Image (tube, rainbow, N blue to C red):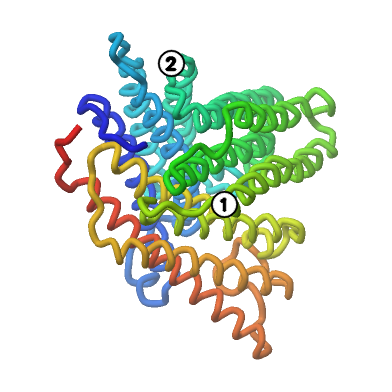
Amino acid sequence: MVGLLPKHQSKDLFWWVLLALTSLAIAGIFAILLVLSRAPITEAKLPWPPDFFSKGLVAHVTLSFIVWFLAVFGCMMTSIISQIDNSKGNKNNTTIDIISIFLVSIGTLALLIPPFYGSGEPSLNNYVPVIIDPIYYTGLAIFTVGILSSVVRFLLTFQQINEEMRGEAWLLLSGGILFILGLVAIFISGSNLSLASVDFNFNETLFWGGGHIFQVLNLSLFFSAITILYKLIYRQQLAPTNFFVGMTSILLVIGLINLSLYSIFDFNDPRLPIAFTKMQFALGVPVVVLFSWLGFNIYNNSIPKNSHKFAFLSLSWSLSLFSIGMILALFVDGQDTRTPAHYHAVIGGINVALIGIFYCWIFPLIGKKLKFEKLIKAQIILYSLGQCLFVIGMFITGTAGASRKIMGPGIELDNLFIIIVTMVKDVGGGLAIIGGGLFIFLAFFALFSQTSNSQ
C-alpha cells in the first residue's frame, strides 16, 4: 500500500510534515516555559513578559491542538492527492498546495508574536483560545485561509483519487466540508457580535458553535487515521466504499444540525449554547458504528506476518485511550478536572493514531526509513500509558472537587488517597511528556534522514 512518491510530490508533503512537527515542538517549548515562569527561582530571576503564563498557555493550546491537528489534516489530504495517477499529465493543483503551506506557516508565525509582545489580553475561552491582539487575530485569519485553500484543492481533485484510498478520502472529504461549516458558524456569530466589545465573552460566543463543528472534523480525522492503520495491519480495506459514504453522511448531518441551531434559536437565546453542548452526544453515533465494525473485523481477522511493526501498537492504544475519553464524557460538568480528563483522553487517543500514521504511512511515502525501532515502541507505550494514568488521576481528583484551568493540584491535599491519586496523575503526565518529546525527536530524525531513492 505504501509506495514512495515522486520527488516533486514528496516535497510538498515534506513541508506539511515539517510544519506539523514544528508546531508540536514549539508547543512543547511553551510548556517548558510555562513551568519555568511559575517556578520559584526562574520566576523571580528571568524577565518574563507581562501575563506570560496565560498568554503562553493560549499559545501552547493553539499549537498543540489547533495547528497540530489541522496541519496533520493538510498532511493527510496531500498524501492522498499525491497518490493520484499522473499518467495523464494531471498536476493535482500543486500550486494551491504551495500557497496553502505558505499561508499556514505565516499564520502560525504570527500567533507566536503576542505572547512575547507585551500587549493584548489572554482569553482562555473554549475551542479557540486567543490573545486579544490584532496580530493574533490576523495570524488566525491567515492560517485559516491556508487550511481552506488546502481543503479546496482536495475537493477539486476528489473524483480523481484512486479506488484504493477512496474510503479514507471520503472521511477526509467530510472533514473538509465540516471545516467550511465551522467557518460559516463563526461568521454567523461574528456578524451578530459586530457591536460587542472584544473580551472573553465575545471570544467564547464567537467560537462556540464553530468549535463544536470542529469537534466533528477532529472525529473525521481520527476515523481516517485508524482506517489507514487497519489497512496497514491487515492488508485489506476496513469496509466497502459505501460504508465510508455512510459514515461521511452521518458526520455531515451532525455538522449541519449544529449549524442549523442558529436558525432554530435566536442568537441571544440562552438555550443556544446549551443546544450546542447537547449535540456532543450525537458524536457517539458514528463512534459506536465505526468501533463496532472495526471490532468485528479485528475479531474475525488474524494479523498477517508482514504487518507493519508499529501500526497495531498505535491502533490498540489509540482505541483504548479514545474509548476511555468517551466514557468519561458521561460524567463531566464543565467545572472541575473531569472535563479536561475527558478531552485529554480523547485528544490523546487521536494523537496516538496520528503518531502511528507518521511512522507507518507518511514517512514511507516520502522515503524516510525509521531507525531506533525499540525506542519507537517505547515512545508509543510511554505516551499512551502516561496519558492513561494522567486522565484517570485527573478524573478522580475532579470527582473530589479539583478545579480546572489553574496552576497546581486545584484541591486540598488533605488525605492519603488524594495525595496518591495526585502523584499518579503527575507521574502519568511526566511519562506522557517524555513520550511526546521522544516522538518529536524521532520524527525530526526520520524527516531529515537520507531519503531512499527507490521508486
Name above or below for residue 38 compared with residue 421: above
Whether residue 393 sits left or right of residue 59 in the image: it is right
Tell me the number on the disc at residue 402: none
Quadrant of residue 200 within the rendered picture: top right
- What is the quadrant of the N terminus in the image? top left
Mark 1: which secondary structure? helix
- Residue 270 picture location, percent across and down: 84, 39
In front here: 235 or 195? 235
Give the class, few, some or many, for how many residues have Cα within 10 Å of label 1's Cα (few <14, many ≥20).
some
| The label number, if any, that marks residue 160 in the structure image | 2
> Are there few (<14), some (14-19), or many (20+) residues within 10 Å of tag 2?
some
- Disc 1: which residue: 298
Q: Quadrant of residue 342?
A: bottom right
Question: Which of these two is toward me, 233 or 336?
Answer: 233
Q: Is residue 210 left or right of residue 25?
A: right
In the rendered image, the residue lying farthest to the bottom is 416
User: Residue at image x 22%, y 24%?
Assistant: 8
Q: Residue 434, percent across and down?
A: 38, 67
The percent position of residue 326, horizontal first and vertical second, equals 68, 55
Identity of the amino acid at label 2?
Gln
